[in-house]
């Protein structure tokens, strides 16, 4: 949700879809493309850190591009 709010929701979904199809085209696999999306990579990498949102920097998903 934090990622969506940072990108004003609509831009989040536009970027998400563009990034997804970029990876589908490059990897030829929908599931692998999903796993390569920067938003998903950040979420999976930090899912066990319960304090992550308190210390997360603005637009931190860029580290996962």
Image (cartoon, rainbow, N blue to C red):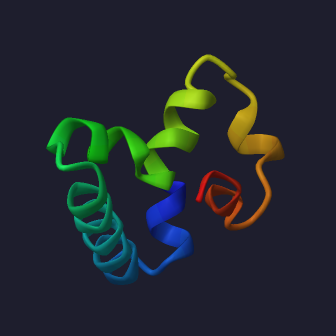
In this rendering, position of residue 3 left or right of residue 60: left
Q: Which residue is drawn at the image coordinates 22% and 66% (left, top)?
A: 21
Q: Quadrant of the C terminus?
A: bottom right
Q: Nearer the viewer, residue 30 or 12?
A: 30
* Residue 34 % position (x, y): 29, 44
Residue 42, given in percent of the width and then of the height, sits at 57, 42
Q: Is residue 1 left or right of residue 49?
A: left
Q: Quadrant of residue 51?
A: top right
Question: Exactly how many numbered labels are in the figure?
Answer: 0
Residue 23 at x, y percent in the picture: 31, 58
Look at the picture and state if 10 lies above or below 32: below
The image shows residue 24, relative to residue 52, as above or below, that is below
Q: Residue at x 69, y 42 (%)?
A: 53
What residue is at 37 percent from the left and 75 percent from the top?
15
- Viewed as shown, does residue 43 lie left or right of 64? left
Locate residue 28 relative to residue 6 in the image: left or right.
Answer: left
Q: Picture quarter containing residue 48?
A: top right
Who's the residue at 31% across and 81% down the image? 10
Quarter occupied by the N terminus: bottom left
Q: Which residue in the rendered view is the most extreme toward the top?
A: 48
Vertical position of residue 30 compared to residue 51: above or below: below
């Amino acid at each position: 949700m934090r990622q969506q709010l940072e990108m004003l929701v609509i831009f989040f979904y536009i970027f998400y879809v563009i990034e997804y199809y970029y990876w589908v085209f490059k990897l030829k696999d929908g599931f692998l493309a999903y796993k390569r999306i920067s938003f998903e990579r950040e979420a999976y990498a930090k899912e066990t850190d319960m304090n992550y949102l308190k210390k997360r920097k603005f637009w931190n998903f860029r580290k996962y591009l």
